[in-house]
Image: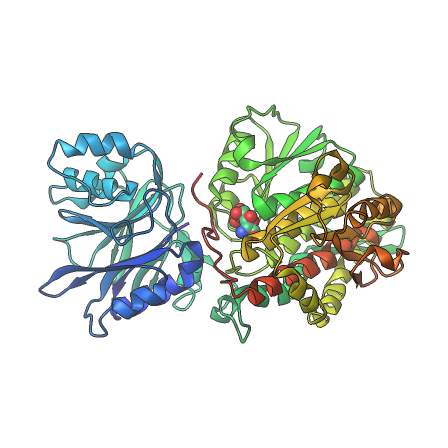
């Protein structure tokens, strides 16, 4: 939510800021702005409603500055307007903010007695007012005092008018990563903005102050003690965060799934020998995840948001089948307020692509505070959830830029399969031969996904039928139900077509009344054990005139009168069908959005990384 960047160095700040904002735009894109120190004129601020391209058009080519801050906004407090766009200035202070200041109303009232009144409706401007009210020439003291008054989450980059070419930063809850390079010092919400300058970066700790100057980034505690920064290295290169010839990031990321899965699965396969036989099994020694984590468990809770939560629904099915331990899946924003019953025999698994989702992070903190064991499945290295979790299983999907999550989802699925197999093996509930066989089957989904991608044009015909729909249903049972939830969110978030996912057997308890002639129903029937039941449910919607798109196994015998389109998945055992079926649903959502002429990568009102509650 909101992308922020700060640069001070030897290059033109406007170029670094605008390029950085373009790469951070997936975090929010309703308005954008920059502020730069300019010779003679002090701080120059340029803001605009709309995307970064609209801001770019307003920035003078000759804006001579080598220090500035930039922001791309996802509105929380106050509508989308130029006034509400960042940066915000009050007196000596100009700042950009990602997060939410929860006590901004009481602070606003208090600060109004000092003669300061806001021009915007934002909570962020109140933070600028507060810092300005505490500033007497010592930035460190003013910021340290201000944060004791702020409630909520924040990442700030702050310019002080009388301290040219310096940027002060602090964060709590919202991410900031930084790097020092030959061309200067740079800080941003996400590593993707730093990639073109460096693969080495450090995560700014919470509640410490960073002061960026051209040649150094000094990090100090609130009390002024200087801290060393631990640098991390990403394996991604600049091209991994570019479109590389695809029309959209989403299309590219869908096509990257075979590689993302290979990178996630292969490093975890280790050769074991038993009774003279060799077996390839999942092994997490290199991840630092010991088998003891799974021993003596009485319960697993999986908690996450959106697509990551849907991956968790699949995880529940796998754990219950193989590990035979009760599993619940909770939406993170609900979990944290329902006073969950947790103990040392409970494993709480949090799942997050970004590793920064505020609700998931809060759920993790709650789990730790109550003494549960914690394991996170995370894509972004060094992110808050990864750092705060007892154990981390990194998916190696690479940077995911499109708001709609695709490769991160299938990589999360792969993580759940691997963890379910390993934990069941470690607990003596899955024989070694079985574990090796399932692991081999999992590896083979990479090829099956490639087969689906080769057929991508086939699914465009279906999208042509969907573009005029106003309502749509996904139905399925078991794994297909978990997948239908994911298919539905994918379609609605980027096509704006209302869609719902239903456990197929539940339709007749209410939802069937919504099935009218020609309402599209995407029926997932990939599981042979419930095929007959699923066919009955398809008959129920068909009898009411539904336009049925069937996704099923090649050998499933289903009367042709029951569907308008049939998609046969490449042969895999049912257990692994969610991978290929997910790719089919992603392609249908992608093509439908594209054919509707929508902004596929940046759908309205959404943002990639949801760092507010
Ligand atoms: C997926 O397409 C969504 N954009 C969204 O549901 C996302 O999965 C959710 O916000 C969780 O994000 P995270 O994985 O970064 O925690």
**Which quadrant would the C terminus be assigned to in this image?**
top left
Q: Nearer the viewer, residue 188 or 571?
A: 571
Q: Is residue 113 visible?
A: yes
Residue 356 drawn at (x, y percent): 47, 46
**Residue 596 horizontal side relative to residue 63, left or right:** right
**156 left or right of 333 in image:** left
Asked if residue 319 shows in the view, the reply is: no
Q: How many marks?
A: 0
Q: Is residue 251 above or below residue 70?
A: below
Q: Residue at x 80, y 63 (%)?
A: 570
Q: Residue 210, percent across and down? A: 29, 49
Q: Nearer the viewer, residue 257 or 211?
A: 257
Q: Colour scheme of this structure image?
A: rainbow
When asked about the image quadrant of residue 395, the answer is: bottom right
Is 345 above or below relative to 91?
above
Residue at x 33%, y 56% (from the top left corner): 31
Q: In this image, 132 relative to 358: left or right?
A: left
Q: Residue furthest left?
A: 40
Vertical comparison of 326 with 100: above or below: above
Q: Position of residue 139 (x, y in %)?
A: 18, 45
State the image coordinates of residue 416 (x, y, percent, origin top left).
Answer: 69, 47
């Amino acid at each position: 939510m909101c992308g922020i960047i700060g640069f001070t160095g030897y290059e033109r700040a406007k170029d670094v800021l605008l390029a950085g904002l373009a790469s951070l735009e997936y975090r929010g894109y309703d308005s954008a702005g920059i502020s730069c120190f300019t010779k003679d004129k002090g701080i120059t601020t340029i803001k605009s409603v709309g995307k970064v391209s609209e801001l770019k058009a307003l920035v003078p080519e000759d804006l001579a500055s080598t220090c500035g801050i930039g922001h791309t906004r996802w509105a929380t407090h106050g509508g989308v307007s130029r006034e509400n766009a960042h940066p915000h200035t009050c007196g000596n202070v100009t700042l950009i903010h990602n997060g939410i200041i929860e006590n901004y109303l009481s602070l606003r009232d208090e600060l109004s007695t000092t003669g300061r009144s806001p021009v915007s409706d934002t909570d962020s401007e109140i933070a600028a007012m507060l810092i300005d009210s505490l500033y007497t020439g010592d930035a460190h003291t003013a910021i340290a005092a201000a944060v004791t008054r702020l409630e909520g989450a924040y990442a700030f980059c702050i310019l002080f008018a009388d301290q040219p070419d310096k940027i002060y930063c602090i964060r709590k809850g919202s991410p900031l990563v930084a790097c020092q390079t030959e061309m200067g010092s740079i800080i941003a919400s996400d590593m993707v903005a730093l990639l073109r300058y460096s693969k080495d970066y450090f995560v700014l700790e919470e509640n410490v102050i960073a002061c960026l100057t051209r040649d150094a980034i000094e990090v100090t505690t609130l009390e002024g003690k200087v801290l060393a920064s631990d640098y991390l290295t990403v394996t991604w290169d600049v091209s991994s965060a570019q479109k590389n010839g695809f029309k959209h990031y989403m299309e590219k990321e869908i096509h990257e799934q075979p590689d993302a899965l290979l990178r996630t699965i292969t490093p975890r396969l280790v050769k074991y020998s038993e009774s003279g036989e060799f077996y390839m099994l999942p092994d997490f020694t290199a991840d630092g995840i010991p088998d003891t984590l799974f021993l003596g468990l009485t319960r697993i809770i999986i908690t996450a948001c959106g697509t990551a939560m849907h991956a968790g629904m699949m995880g529940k099915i796998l754990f219950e089948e193989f590990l035979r331990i009760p599993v619940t899946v909770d939406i993170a924003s609900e979990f944290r307020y329902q006073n969950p019953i947790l103990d040392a025999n409970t494993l709480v698994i949090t799942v997050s692509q970004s590793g920064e989702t505020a609700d998931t992070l809060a759920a993790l903190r709650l789990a730790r505070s109550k003494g549960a064991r914690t394991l996170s499945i995370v894509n972004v290295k060094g992110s808050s959830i990864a750092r705060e979790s007892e154990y981390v299983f990194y998916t190696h999907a690479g940077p995911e830029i499109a708001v709609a999550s695709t490769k991160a989802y299938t990589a999360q699925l792969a993580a759940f399969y691997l963890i379910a197999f390993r934990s069941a093996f470690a607990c003596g509930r899955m024989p070694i031969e079985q574990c090796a066989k399932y692991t081999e089957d999992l590896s083979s989904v990479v090829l099956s996904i490639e087969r689906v991608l080769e057929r991508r044009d086939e699914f465009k015909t279906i999208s042509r039928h969907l573009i005029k729909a106003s309502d749509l249903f996904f139905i399925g049972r078991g794994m297909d139900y978990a997948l239908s939830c994911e298919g539905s969110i994918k379609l609605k978030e980027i096509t704006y077509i209302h869609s719902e996912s239903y456990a197929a057997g539940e339709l007749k308890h209410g939802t069937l009344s919504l099935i009218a002639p020609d309402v599209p129903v995407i029926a997932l029937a990939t599981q042979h054990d419930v095929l007959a039941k699923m066919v009955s449910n398809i008959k129920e919607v068909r009898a009411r005139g539904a336009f049925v798109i069937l996704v099923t196994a090649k050998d499933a015998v289903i009367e042709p009168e029951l569907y308008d389109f049939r998609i046969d998945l490449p042969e895999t055992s049912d257990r692994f069908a969610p991978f290929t079926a997910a790719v089919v649903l992603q392609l249908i959502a992608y093509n439908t959005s594209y054919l509707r002429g929508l902004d596929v990568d940046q759908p309205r009102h959404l943002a990639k990384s949801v760092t507010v509650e």
